[in-house]
Amino acid sequence: MPRTHATVEAAVRVLELFDADRTEWTLSDLARHLNQPTSTVHEQLQTLAGVGLLVRLGRGRYGLGWRLLKLSSALYGSLPWYAPAHDAMERLARGTHLLAFLCVLHDDSVLCVARSVQGRDGPPVAGELDFELPAHATASGKLLLALAGQALPHPTAAFTPQTLTGAAAWNAESRSIRAQGHALSRDEWAPGTSGLAVPVRGEGGAVLAALGLSLPTARLHAAETLLRKLKDAAAEVGWTLGHRG
Amino acid sequence: MPRTHATVEAAVRVLELFDADRTEWTLSDLARHLNQPTSTVHEQLQTLAGVGLLVRLGRGRYGLGWRLLKLSSALYGSLPWYAPAHDAMERLARGTHLLAFLCVLHDDSVLCVARSVQGRDGPPVAGELDFELPAHATASGKLLLALAGQALPHPTAAFTPQTLTGAAAWNAESRSIRAQGHALSRDEWAPGTSGLAVPVRGEGGAVLAALGLSLPTARLHAAETLLRKLKDAAAEVGWTLGHRG
């Protein structure tokens, strides 16, 4: 591995230790966690603070820096579908009082690129704050994999007895998702939590993202109504983006 | 400058060339732009793609990668005020059909950390997509500088004849902003565009962010009504965060 690669990778590894569960680190805690000399970690922290990706909070404590948002706002700005899809997601959350989100497929990972920040009813939902979702155990993941014609990623952890793990079961599920144009997950990631997802399509019908809802399984009886709302919302975004399907 | 610092800084410099105006770069264009050997730039691009901060789009073209969003979602997740303030901002945009936003002060830069993505009335507004705003020529910037008791940053470019540039004028403006608890900008950044901003305060009255609206100057006659809406929205967020002011 060339020197540049190793240096930048080490820096990104340090950055990613700052997450929703752990928003601050001290030099000494980081050095202990990474099992590296304090001097090495100190140099990395100084470097990341120097370019604005971290910020010094005082007394050796560090947090994530605003410069990250500059970069991510450029990424969002580069996606012509993001603004209309985000708008549709927020409307959906307000109209259903459920957690709505947008996911994309990256290799065989499902990334949750936006979530409604509106208040919603009910207790917290499994994976509510996760950025990477298990593709085989979520409605959005199954939808995106099926529409891309992809196999289940390996390894496929069985989170609950309902988690889909076998290739034969996936083939049937995948065909059914493609035929129906939506995906449903029921207690497959966490007992009591279910999901619904439909595709957001752009010009020529290309699948841009999954628009989904997370809900207590007890509320799945309303799935028909919710699916209609999801499909209407996705169709409206598609229309804005030139999809005439 | 130690080797680590230089390497990471160069990588961040490459990343920041990808912005809303230029979302894709080819190796040869980048090397020309940076006036560096193709081999050096190629190594940097491979490194950034290797850690997921860039993504290869095919035929030597690169774009920003999703991993940035993982990092920025951790940053948002680390801010307890972000969700309620974002919610208030979106409600405000829907209620006024204007562009609403949240800004923070970082040293003497004003960073726009969130914008309403809702549709709004009227033509595009100056700086609508910028991440860094000129502190002395925007309502949010003037508000945050005044409440922090800071001087005008130097240099203070005069964007229009209305831009505030002198220290004496700023002292008077700053006092008036602190007394009124809001800031107004009128044609100070771009002719025809004005802004209003109020503080979002947390526990103990600490200023967390500016909540603002951007509007055509022709609509400033409604400033009283808009300011009431802004103050109500900010007060509601403050209440959620424990500010009893």
Image: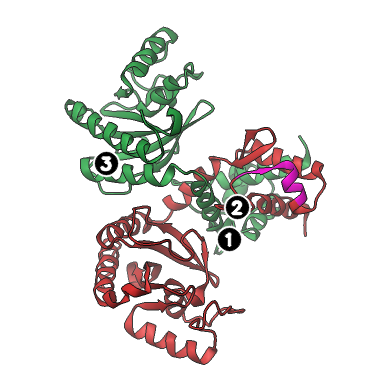
Chain colours: A green, B red
A175 horizontally vs B159: left or right: left
Q: Is residue B166 above or below residue A28?
A: below
To which residue does mark 2 refer? A28
- Quadrant that contains the C terminus of chain A: top left
Do labels 3 and 2 touch, CB within 8 Å?
A: no
Kind of residue at badge 2: Ser
Residue furthest bottom as drawn: B168
Residues beneath discs 3 and 2 located on the same chain? yes
| Numbered range of the magenta stretch | B24-32
SS of the residue under disc 3: helix
Q: Is residue A139 above or below residue A97?
A: above
Crowding at mark 2 (Cα within 10 Å: few <14, some 14-19, many 20+): some
**Chain ID of residue with mark 3:** A
**Chain ID of residue with mark 2:** A
- Which quarter of the picture shows residue A103? top left
Closest to the observer: B239 or B182? Answer: B182
Do labels 3 and 1 touch, CB within 8 Å?
A: no
To which residue does mark 3 refer? A92
Name the residue rendered at 57%, 53% in the picture: B21
Name the residue rendered at 63%, 55% in the picture: A48
Residue B59 visible in the displayed image? yes
Q: Main secondary structure of the magenta part?
A: helix
Q: Position of residue A53 (x, y in %)?
A: 59, 55
To which residue does mark 1 refer? A60
Question: Disc 2 or 1, which lies upstream in sequence?
Answer: 2
Do labels 2 and 1 touch, CB within 8 Å?
A: yes
Kind of residue at badge 3: Leu
Residues beneath discs 2 and 1 located on the same chain? yes
SS of the residue under disc 1: loop
Question: Disc 3 or 1, which lies upstream in sequence?
Answer: 1
Q: Position of residue B99 (x, y in %)?
A: 36, 61
Crowding at mark 1 (Cα within 10 Å: few <14, some 14-19, many 20+): few
